[in-house]
Image (cartoon, helix red, strand yellow):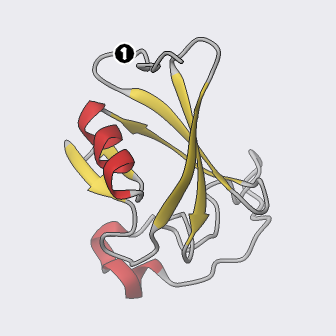
Amino acid sequence: MRMITPKFTDGLVTVVVVDTRTREVLMVAYANEEALALTRRTGLAHYYSRSRGRIWKKGEESGHLQRVVRILVDCDEDTLLYEVDQMGVACHTGHRSCFYRTLDGDEITPRMFDPEEMYGKEKKP
């Protein structure tokens, strides 16, 4: 069986994250080669933050970790799908998923924690 190396664009690959049990899309993020290697080695999701300019482990501040059960690659080999066991919530806004509102701005799921209490005012969405 051949090992697949994802196609990185500008050093990054898109990662779609789904909950293993519910199949709910929790978030979309990016990984570079180092973040992907850390994810594979530790079993915990690591990503590359474009805004911070560094690798971060999901949940490093909040404790809301993602245990990666399986990593799939799409047919073009340019997008990854992480199937995860989500501990806590996935979104820094306090929602379970980053996809918590419609395009019209209607929130469709409740907030599970106050981000100001978790991160302070500088990280408020």
Residue 14 screen position, x and y as percent: 48, 30
Residue 36 screen position, x and y as percent: 35, 39
Graded by Cα atoms within 10 Å as few (under 14), some (14 to 19) or many (20 or more), the crowding at tag 1 reads few
Q: Nearer the viewer, residue 65 or 113?
A: 65
Outermost residue toward the left in this view = 53
Q: Residue at x 28, y 55 (%)?
A: 56
Q: Residue at x 58, y 67 (%)?
A: 86
Q: Nearer the viewer, residue 121 or 46?
A: 46
Q: Quadrant of the N terminus?
A: top right
Report whether residue 49 is seen. no
Q: Nearer the viewer, residue 49 or 100?
A: 49
The part of the image, by quadrant, that contains residue 53 is: top left
The amino acid marked with disc number 1 is: Thr
Find numbered disc 1 in the image and state the secondary structure of the residue it sits on: loop
Residue 7 screen position, x and y as percent: 42, 15
Total tally of numbered discs in the picture:
1
Compared across the picture, whether 86 is left or right of 124 comes to: right
Report whether residue 75 is seen. yes
Compared across the picture, whether 81 is left or right of 33 comes to: right
Q: Is residue 81 above or below residue 66?
A: above
Outermost residue toward the bottom in this view = 117
Q: Nearer the viewer, residue 18 or 69?
A: 69
Q: Residue at x 49, y 15 (%)?
A: 2
Q: Is residue 20 above or below residue 76?
A: below
Compared across the picture, whether 56 is left or right of 89 comes to: left
Compared across the picture, whether 53 is left or right of 98 comes to: left
Q: Is residue 33 above or below residue 77?
A: below
Outermost residue toward the top in this view = 76
The residue at which mark 1 appears reads as 9
Q: Quadrant of the C terminus?
A: bottom left
The part of the image, by quadrant, that contains residue 33 is: top left
